[in-house]
Amino acid sequence: MYLSDEEQAMLDGRDGPGVQAAMDLLQRYGKALGAERLVATNNVVASVNATTPFMRNIAAQGGGMDAVLSEFSLDSDTVVKIPKVRTFTTHTQLGFDPGNPKSMGVDEATMHFYRQGEAFIAGLGVQITNTCTPYQVGNIPTRGEHCAWMESSAVVYCNGVIGAKTNCEGRESAGAAMLTGRIPYWGYHIDANRRGTHGVRLEVPVRTTADWGLLGYWIGEQVQDRVPVVHGLTSLPNLARLKHFGAAASSSGGVEMFHLVGVTPEAPTLEAAFGGQTPTAELVYGLAQQREAWDKVNTTGRDTAVDFVMLGCPHYTIEQIWEASRLLEGRRVHENCELWIFTPRAIKSLADRNGYTATIEAAGAKLMTDSCSAMSRAAPVGAKVVALDSAKQAHYLPPILGVQAWFGSTQECVDAACTGQWRGERP
């Protein structure tokens, strides 16, 4: 793999052992992928903190956070000093909400370690946003910008909605990118790979956030890791609907890039979205397919007595918090149920000032940050049946926590939280 003079100097150790280890990892990674070269990036989304008990044990055995990053971000057999980041880097989720440690089963020792870790990564120059939706809190790359992002729902949003360029990176490659400003040039960094492969013609209205989640879930199963081109839209999706669409498609399949004709930046027309290529297949999404998606995403749902409702996967927008607070105003969460809503810390601050947090808490619900139940593997003690307005979370939470899951609209989920019963309706 070709290295520029600057990249070779980093590999030779000019900038210290941390950067050298990072460049060594990127060179091995790029070769394994068949990349011919690296590309410069100044936009990284990475997981840097010690988010698991195993990582915290590594830190405690000697070397602290330098040891954690050396092994888990740089694949280094020896502990190296981690320098300040070279690129603008925002942090993904943690394993718990530091504002609600008891609810998530976190003890004081873990909280103490968390505070030390957060101070460490802030000292490196990493933005401690702690969210799977970095584009909501200031990390908004420009169209065509090369990025190195983690987190599947963030990656598909970055590629499809923003029109920036990234592959779905792991902790190692993203960690190396933040220290070098480089990432292998392959996959969705290359324009030819961003063209549509499968057409999807809509024959049923797709309007609500739940509608978009079902569409994404169905498309992901059909195209897997290819590039769908959706046409026939009758209404424009907002940020939340695009977020849930991409998150669902990247969960049921491996979609990292999509086009919505007339909506997303690289698809002004159907012809532009395919870039002159003939589609591999032309799929139709009608009422039968919508019901098929609903049945599959609700496949674990059996009992209608709901004891847990989780909203905010991906993290809620301020608009979604506003909506949830309106739905909860004057109501009370059922005594046999808990309602947790997750959002970025910065957006919770806005919700606090607007009075939405007070409304949510007055109803007996919690507005939480920095994590989610899938990432934390945490739920109220004894929870068995959960209601969700995220197709992604309905896909992941049953195997992670061993619960039944019901997927539906935000209204249906709030009603379930307040009545303790699931009454969601099939399309």
Image: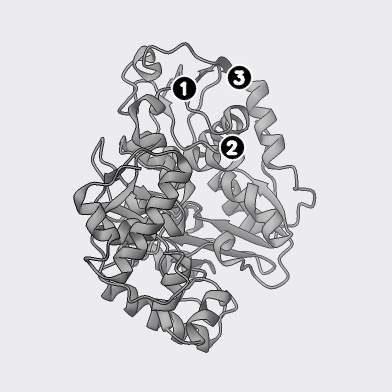
Vertical side of 391 occupied by 206: above or below: above
Which label belongs to residue 101?
A: none
Residue for badge 2: 253
Secondary structure under badge 1?
strand
Residue for badge 3: 286
Amino acid carrying label 2: it is Gly
Tell me residue 404's x, y (percent). Answer: 73, 54
Who's the residue at 74% across and 60% down the image?
402
Secondary structure under badge 3?
loop
Disc nearer the start of the sequence (3/2): 2
In which quadrant will I find the N terminus?
top left
Report which quarter residue 400 is drawn in.
bottom right
Amino acid carrying label 1: it is Val
Residue for badge 1: 230
Observer-nearest residue: 78 or 310?
Answer: 78
Q: Nearer the viewer, mark 2 or mark 1?
A: 2
Does the CB distance between marks 2 and 1 fall below 8 Å? Answer: no
Amino acid carrying label 3: it is Gly
Label 2, label 1: how many angstroms apart (C-alpha)? 16 Å
Tell me residue 107's x, y (percent). Answer: 55, 85
Label 3, label 2: how many angstroms apart (C-alpha)? 19 Å
Question: How crowded is the residue under tag 1: few (<14 C-alpha within 10 Å), some, or many (20+)?
Answer: many
